[in-house]
Image: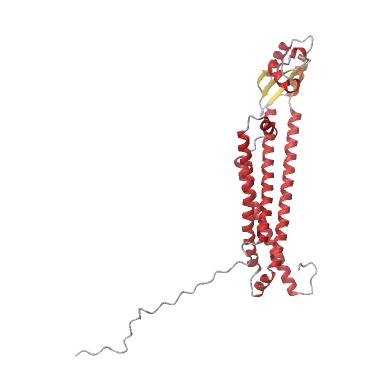
Amino acid sequence: MTEPPSRSREKAPDKAEQKRPEMRVRPTAPILPPSNIQGNALMVVIAIMAFLACLTLGGVSMVRSTAASWESQISREITIQIKPDDNLDMEKALTQARDLAMTFVGTKSGQIVDEAATARLLEPWLGPGLDLKDLPVPRLIVVTIDESNPPDFDAMRSLLKDSIPQASLDDHRTWVDRLVSMAHTTVMIGTGILLLVFTAMVLTVVFATRGALSGNRHVVEVLHFVGAESSFVATEFQKHFLKISLKGSAIGSALAALFFATAGFWQSRTLATPETDQATALFGTFSVGVLGYAGIFATMIVIALLTTFTARLTVMRTIYEIDTLRSDPTRTDGIAS
C-alpha cells in the first residue's frame, strides 16, 4: 500500500505569478539646456567668425599662389630691348643680340618679338593699324633662362652694351622683389585678420560662458554642495559649448567652401568675357584646391577646439571664484558676482 505524498513537498510555482518589473535608471538631464536663445546666438556668431576666417585663409592662399605664378613666369624670362637709331640696322642688331645672349650658360632659348606682335602689345594704348616704321618703338627679344642656374646678368648686360650701344637688358629683378614683398605683406595682413577674428571669437565665448554660468549659478552651487567636482561641472559646460562650436564652425566653413566652389565654377563658365579675364589676371583662379579645402577644414577644427578650451578655462575660473567667495564671504574684491 503506497504512502500519501508528504505535505512538506514544495508546491509547484504558480505560472500566473507575474515577474516584477526591472528597475530602470532615469537618464540624467544635462546641466545646461541643449538649445536656447543664448546658445543659438552664440552658434550664429561662431558661424560668422568661421566664415570670415576661412574666407581670409582662402583669399591669402589665392594671392600667394597668384604671386608665386607671376614670380615664376617673370623669373623664367629676361628681356633685351633695342632702341631704334638712324644708323642702326634693327633686324641685324636683333639677331646679333639674341646670338650673344645664347652664348651664356643658363640660357635656353631666344625669341625675337616681330613687328606684328609688337603692334599688338601697343594696340590697347595706340589703337589698331599701327605702323611701327613711323614711330621710334623699341624692339624686344625674350630670352628663356634656367631658373635653377641663371646666367651672369651683369656680364651679359656689359657685353650687349659694348656690342650694341642701343641695347639694354632687363632681368626683371625689381619686379620679382616687388612681388615677393607684396606676397609677404598680403600674408601678414591675412594673418592679422585671422588673429583678430580668433580674438573676437574668444572674447565672445568668454562672455557667453559667463552668461550661461550666471543663469545657472544656483545649479553649479548645488552641485558643489552635494560634492560634485569642478572637473565634472567644467566637462558638462565643455560638452555643451563643443556642440555649439562644432555646429557653428561647420556652418561657417561650409559656406566659405561653397563660396569658393561657386566662384570657381562661375569663373570657369565665363572665361571669355573681359571682366573674368581681368579678374583672373589680377587675382588668379578662385579655386583654392585640395590644400585650400583642407585648410578650411583645419580652421573649423581649430575654432571648435579653441572655443571649447576657452569655455573650460572660463568655467574653472568662475567655479574658483564661487569657492573663494563661499570660503570668505567678506572677500568680494576682484570676484565676479
- Which quadrant of the figure contains the C terminus? bottom right
Residue 46, image quadrant: bottom right
Q: Position of residue 208 (x, y in %)?
A: 70, 60
- 173 or 207: which is nearer to us? 207
Q: Is residue 177 left or right of residue 249?
A: right
Q: Quadrant of residue 13?
A: bottom left
Q: Considering depth in this image, is 23 or 127 the residue closer to the camera?
A: 127
Residue 172, image x, y percentages: 74, 27
Image height of 298 relative to 23, above or below? above
Residue 22 placement (x, y as % from top left) = 46, 74
Q: Residue 195: in sight, yes or no? A: yes
Q: Position of residue 217 (x, y in %)?
A: 69, 69
**Which colour scheme appears in the figure?**
secondary structure
Of all residues, the one furthest to the right in this rendering is 333
Query: How many labels were placed on the picture?
Result: 0
Q: Is residue 245 rendered to the left or right of residue 5?
A: right
Quadrant containing the N terminus is bottom left
121 and 127: which one is in front?
Answer: 127
Report if residue 114 is visible in the image: no
Instruction: Tell me: residue 297, above or below residue 14.
Output: above
